[in-house]
Image: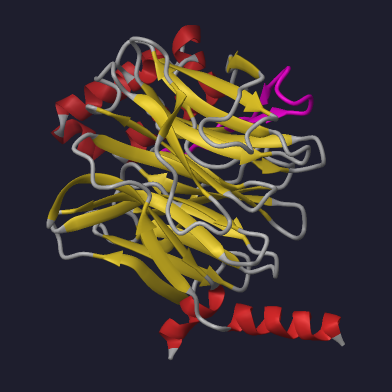
Amino acid sequence: MLTLLVAAAAFSALNTPLYNSELIFPMDPKHNHGSSIVECPNGELLACWFHGSGERKEDDVLVQGARLGKKSKEWSPVFVMADTPGLPDCNPVLFIDPRKTLWLFWIAVQDNEWGGSLLKYRTSTHYAKKGAPKWDWQDDIHCRPVDLEPAMLDAITKAQGKYAAVLDADPKLKAELEDLKKASHVKLTQRLGWMTRLHPIMTSDKRMMLGLYSDVFNTSLAAFTEDWGKTWQFSKPIITPDLGNIQPSFVPKKDGGIVAFMRDNGIPQQIRRAESKDKGISWSEVTTLDIPNPGSSVDCIALKNGRWVLVCNDLKDGRHRLTAYLSEDEGTTWPVKRPLEDFQPDKGSGSYPSLIQAKDGSLHCTYSYSNKETPGESIKHVRFNEAWLRASEK
């Protein structure tokens, strides 16, 4: 009888709309961006983001973090998660693997340009106490993308044919494409500048798949490790003659395929999509969703019940609306949606979501937040559920 009562209570909780939100820290005059969130084994939430006077151009940028206890109503004081002296630390990503080891991935920008970013990670098995985790190990990830040069040269050739009229009318853009062709031949340029943005996924008990992207090549790929970071392998690029598909969010399908949803960094300003049938090694042609994208990061996860949730900015003219979408057919259609933020243009923004589903079935999302009524920037945390999302249908 007690088991039935507990199950009934859990069912009722899942079907009752849930939504609450708070800022992780008060509005701050410095730049706070690119958050990531995980749920720890003890039910505590751990979030991180980068903080400083700017982004890659400012050498005071570091990675900060905070905790929210399972029974707490307020986030802990902010603490430092990573700080490479004299270099900007950006784009942090948190992950807890099947061994319950905590990972922090991020980039240290060597020359104040995204193309000079060095990919780094550290791990911890002691992260349950207050303050920053105690890190057990740290290393760099040296990237060697598979077939990047021929894939880039082929994409550039196709782009030059497809957009010949546009390029002839824009000498600057034409020169940039020629510069990109030259960069495709340079080994150091091929191997530096790969950046993180979103949670990795596990494609087996031991195989981790981490999404990477390059602002130099305007494309994405995957990194894999089967020995917990001792060695890494890399996929073929997820590439298109349109270029501009970056910051991949990977979602596993029931049939074993993997879908990548990506930011559109160019034209046609719609969320990009590609699919892999071989566990992320090679990728299909890049297509688009019928959801606008203003050049802003997206995140997508598969829920325990098989439905998918996508969070994104879904306007072409800015990041002032952040919307959660629900799919019942593994991302083919997205009939249910509800805004998490919906400002008037130039009145505020919510962007760069990091999305997880907690053990209790609720969804947690952190994102960069600004509101012109209160100067500064913060990271916002919202907790909601599928029932709240579906309430928008009524």
As drawn, 28 above or below 54 = below
Please name whichever residue, 76 or 391, is drawn nearer the observer in this view of the structure. 76
Colour scheme of the rendered structure: secondary structure
Give above or below for 88 relative to 342.
above
Percent position of residue 147, x then y: 60, 22
166 sits to left or right of 81: left
Tell me where residue 120 sits by quadrant.
top right
Decide which of 271, 11 is in the foreground and name it.
Answer: 11
Relative to 250, residue 12 above or below: below
User: Which of 156/297 is in front?
Assistant: 297
Specify whether 138 is left or right of 233.
left
Pick the quarter of the image with the C terminus.
bottom left
Magenta highlight on residue 297: no
The x, y position of residue 53, in whole percent, is 22, 27
Q: State whether residue 227 appears in this view.
A: yes
Left or right of residue 194, residue 123 in this image:
right
Q: Tell me the residue at 54%/23% (across/down).
A: 148
Picture coordinates of residue 199 (x, y %)? 57, 42
- Whole-percent x and y of residue 345? 15, 60
Q: Quadrant of residue 96?
A: top right
Residue 232 on the magenta span: yes
Residue at x 51%, y 46% (from the top left corner): 37
The quarter of the rendered structure image containing the N terminus is bottom right
Q: Main secondary structure of the magenta part?
A: loop
Name the residue furthest right: 1
Q: Which residues are magenta?
A: 222-242
Residue at 77 percent of width and 58 percent of height: 255
